[in-house]
């Protein structure tokens, strides 16, 4: 009785294996056809175009007033400083740019590869276009999810660091303030560099912070249905209710204490410390984010976080010094408006 049953099971397994093999062959055939189609489309899009070479950048474009060479000369140092030795791979992946007349109404052929941009862009916007579309492979999923946005070269990293400094000063978070004051463990917490368990208590350690988070960020979400009673209890200063509600949020929904710029700047700091091969090491590692960044930088995580914080603190915006005559002018205007106010009938007895 067992033999026919086993034979039937083997038959089903063989049949399913055959279907899986058939699907795999079909997928490979479709992939090969797609590659051929993509190759033909790229050849059609690049035929008769000029090639601009700056560093390891290659730009294939039609002739136009677009300042591509000047933009590439501005963009290349920023690209090279971020990607290091990995920037050499860009020679194999050229930009394909089609500059078009923005005012024409004539129909034109459609290409399915490259970028189509108006040819009246100025140098600044053309440079931004190149930086925002560097043809590098996408980041792996864990690194991309942690960053929250694509990592792109920057023409003004100092401005990005100033933005992070203002975040450290103004963020309504005890953990962020502790980072600002020099507690590196809190910096690692708010950047989510280490263990991601218990982030709620580490990001928002005080009951008022958690209550404000429930009320201001998720009030509409929690104030109905089965959560309405717990929401009202939270507003009535029950920290257990607030914490319980926040724990029901899906993974990745909890607002981060610091915005994208903070995470981007520590990646740039790791790449700067680690030298030309640091970006490659960052991509090759499968460890936790903090360990990956430390390996890319070639230093311990505490040293990396400390270097990042020092760079942010040095980016503090400079105070504006008023000239001596500005103070006198201010008092003069105050006296003038005061005199005008005293002449008003409202101030007369």
Image (cartoon, grey):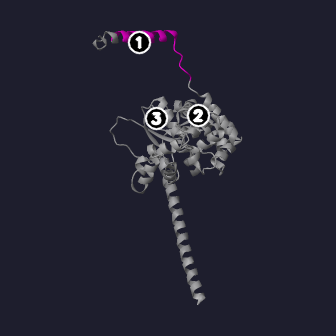
Q: Camera-side residue: 148 or 212? A: 212
Residue carrying label 2: 78
The residue at the point 69 percent across, 40 percent down is 302
The residue at the point 57 percent across, 81 percent down is 9
Quadrant of the rendering where the C terminus is positioned: top left
> Circle 1 — which element?
helix
Q: Camera-side residue: 28 or 136? A: 136
Residue 159: image quadrant is top right
Q: Residue furthest front?
A: 349
Q: CA distance from mark 3 to mark 2?
A: 25 Å
Residue 73: tell me if it is visible: no
Q: CA distance from mark 1 to mark 2?
A: 49 Å
Residue 3: tell me if it is visible: yes
User: Could you classify mark 2 by the number of other residues whose Cα lies within 10 Å: few (under 14), some (14-19), or many (20 or more)?
Assistant: some
Disc marking residue 284: none
Query: In x, y percent, where is residue 122?
Result: 45, 29
Residue carrying label 3: 63
Query: In x, y percent, where is residue 178?
Result: 61, 37
């Amino acid at each position: 009785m067992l033999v026919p049953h086993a034979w039937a099971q083997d038959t089903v397994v063989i049949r399913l294996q055959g279907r899986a093999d058939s699907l795999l062959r079909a997928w490979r055939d479709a992939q090969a056809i797609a590659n051929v189609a993509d190759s033909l489309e790229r050849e059609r899009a690049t035929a008769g175009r000029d090639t601009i070479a700056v560093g390891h950048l290659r730009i294939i474009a039609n002739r136009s007033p677009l300042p591509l060479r000047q933009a590439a000369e501005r963009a290349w140092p920023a690209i090279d400083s971020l990607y290091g030795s990995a920037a050499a791979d860009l020679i194999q992946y050229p930009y394909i740019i089609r500059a078009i007349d923005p005012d024409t109404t004539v129909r034109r052929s459609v290409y399915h590869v490259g970028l189509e941009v108006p040819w009246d862009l100025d140098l600044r916007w053309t440079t931004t276009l190149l930086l925002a579309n560097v043809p590098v492979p996408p980041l792996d999923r864990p690194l991309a999810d942690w960053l929250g946005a694509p990592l792109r070269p920057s023409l003004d990293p100092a401005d990005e660091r100033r933005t992070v400094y203002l975040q450290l000063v103004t963020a309504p978070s005890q953990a962020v303030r502790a980072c600002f004051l020099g507690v590196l463990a809190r910096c690692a917490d708010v950047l989510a560099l280490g263990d991601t368990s218990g982030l709620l208590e580490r990001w928002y350690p005080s009951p008022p912070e958690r209550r404000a988070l429930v009320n201001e960020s998720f009030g509409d979400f929690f104030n109905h249905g089965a959560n309405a009673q717990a929401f009202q209890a939270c507003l009535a200063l029950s920290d257990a209710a607030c914490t319980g509600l926040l724990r029901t949020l899906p993974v990745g929904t909890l607002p981060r204490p610091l915005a994208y710029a903070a995470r981007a700047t520590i990646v740039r700091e790791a790449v700067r410390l680690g030298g030309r091969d640091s970006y490659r090491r960052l991509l090759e590692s499968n460890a936790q984010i903090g360990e990956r960044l430390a390996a890319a930088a070639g230093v311990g995580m505490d040293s990396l976080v400390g270097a990042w914080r020092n760079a942010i603190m040095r980016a503090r915006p400079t105070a504006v010094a008023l000239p001596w005559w500005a103070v006198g002018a201010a008092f003069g205007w105050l006296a003038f408006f005061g005199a005008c106010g005293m002449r008003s009938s409202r101030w007369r007895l």
